[in-house]
Amino acid sequence: MPEQKFQWKNSQIRKQIDVLTNDLAPTVVLKNATYLNSYLRQWMKANIWIYEDRIVYVGDKLPDKTSQMEIIDCASKVVVPGYIEPHAHPFQLYNPQSLARYVSQTGTTTFVGDNLFLLLQTNKKKALTFIEDMEKLPYHFYWWARFDLQTEVNSEEKVFSHDFVRKWLEHKAVLQGGELTGWPKLADGDDWILYWLQETKRKGKRLEGHFPGASENTLMKMKLFGVDSDHESMTGKDVVNRLKMGYTAALRQSSIRQDLEKLIREVQDEGLTVYDHLYFTTDGSTPTFYENGMINTCINIALECNVPAIDAYHMASFNIARYYQIEDRIGVIAPGRMATLNILENIDNPNPLSVMSKGKWLVKNREVQPYNDGVKWEQYGLEPAEIKWDLLIDDLQFSMPMGMKMRNAVIMEPYSITIDSSSDNLSENHDESFLALIDRNGQWRVNTMVKGFSNKVQGFASSYSTTGDIIIIGKNKNEMLSAFARMKEIGGGIVLSENDRIIFELPLQLNGGASNEVLDKIMTKHKELNILLKERGYPFDDPIHSLLFLSSTHLPYIRITPRGIFDVMKKTVLFPSIMR
């Protein structure tokens, strides 16, 4: 197990012992609760004593000392561990705090999150300070340590310096290396990635893969490299194959792949009856997907698919905690664990009546409780983006012979440009648009055409992207300039311009990559953007994923990256970026 600093000081443990020996009153007692005993795999009846942030007793007794103690009668209620999101991308327009505040109201209080945004958008030292400070909030935040950026950037070695990756891997809040989107480089002989995989295993931490559509041979190789889990199963057979090889496998229900019901029914058809090495994930869904909560929705689908209730709740808590080797802290209702739990009306309804995290009531009897979870973003250098350059009409020159065709929201393939791209306006009779990726510091640009995004979007600008660079799309170069100018003025964000006016803007105050608003407001703006783009011809489910994955080289077939137009399959730059 990874080396960990113990959660509680000696003086705190002594007080917890005093509670157990009836020399001190508990803080909270859940009386006559039916709770999930994960080690016995049984629903049991007990009184649960909590002192401050720790469960100190689970059994038949009630405390003798009751001074200032809160007693909750759970005679007709069910207590389960707090739900865990094991694969979060916590900067998808929202931020970790706004996401946690919203979804914790439906029971998800623990997150194992991607550090990509922190690698690309923050100062290295401040990034580590940030993850330490997030531990002070009334939620549980853990993190990954990436070994690749899932795109092609200039001077990648500056982002992944030897010392910096080591500091991430050594941090107590970092539970795993990955997700390993750069596995083709590893398979082709990249010994630096292999070195970091070995370092991760040496520190006793997990390795997560990213293997959509991988062959049996590839999965075998990755197991030999030391990978422990994968969240990219697309069929029940994929899940079973991963389990056969000793992987822990995620069942995904996300805004881009709503596969959970299908996966469960297919693994059942494959004869699977043991769910111990499976868990749920929503895989960094976009804001509106979380309107009804997060992991609670996955449990509900599993119950409707006749997954045994204990397994359904374990895939949301215990299985994850055990996999990440933190079940001594969370994911279990037992003495010595953090008091992070959900009180349910009954076993068949995973939407909690009350939510406790780290001993604090976040929700009680369906009423959100007052508590402090504010974040001073500016102290981590996460402020409105300061863009110190102007976009000029000369930057919008398009003469490339090859463009990017959208097969779906995230898959791009090359196509030959046949229309005249030299004019300032394109016809609305086709779905080809100007596309530019421009360095956020104004040093380089990549200009091409995109087919399939829209036939009526005049000007669109976004500082939300994989790398944090600026995406400009549109039919009208003047409207593209206007959208950029407004995006710059608001300190980064997403802007739509049409007929000489701004028709939509979403400020992203955290360096142009995420909002500091509450999730409800972000959802409203996300819905508005979806409607406006679909009215103008965007044909897919979610444009946010299209923006995010335009530069992502872990997906086929062609990408627009800081290095230029990149052929993913051949691993070559087809057309390099141009200095401005």
Image (spheres, rainbow, N blue to C red):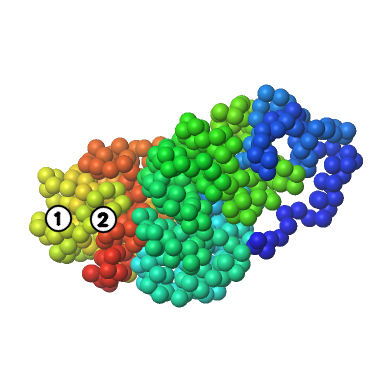
| Quadrant into which the N terminus falls | bottom right
Residue 329 sits above or below residue 568 on the image: above
Q: Which mark is residue 412?
A: 2
Residue at point 48%, 67% (across, down): 224
Residue 57 point in image, percent of width and height: 78, 40
The residue closer to the viewer here, 558 or 499, is 558
Left or right: residue 403 compared with residue 231 = left
Residue at point 51%, 74% (across, down): 195
Residue 418 sits above or below residue 338 on the image: below
Left or right: residue 329 compared with residue 126 = right
Residue 342 sits above or below residue 431 on the image: above
Residue annotated with mark 1: 424
Q: Is residue 445 visible?
A: no
**Disc 1 marks which amino acid?**
Asp
The residue closer to the viewer here, 353 or 240, is 240
Q: Which residue lies furthest to the front in this view?
A: 271
Residue 115 point in image, percent of width and height: 50, 59
Residue at point 63%, 55% (across, down): 325
Residue 557 sits above or below residue 299 on the image: below
Residue 103 point in image, percent of width and height: 53, 39
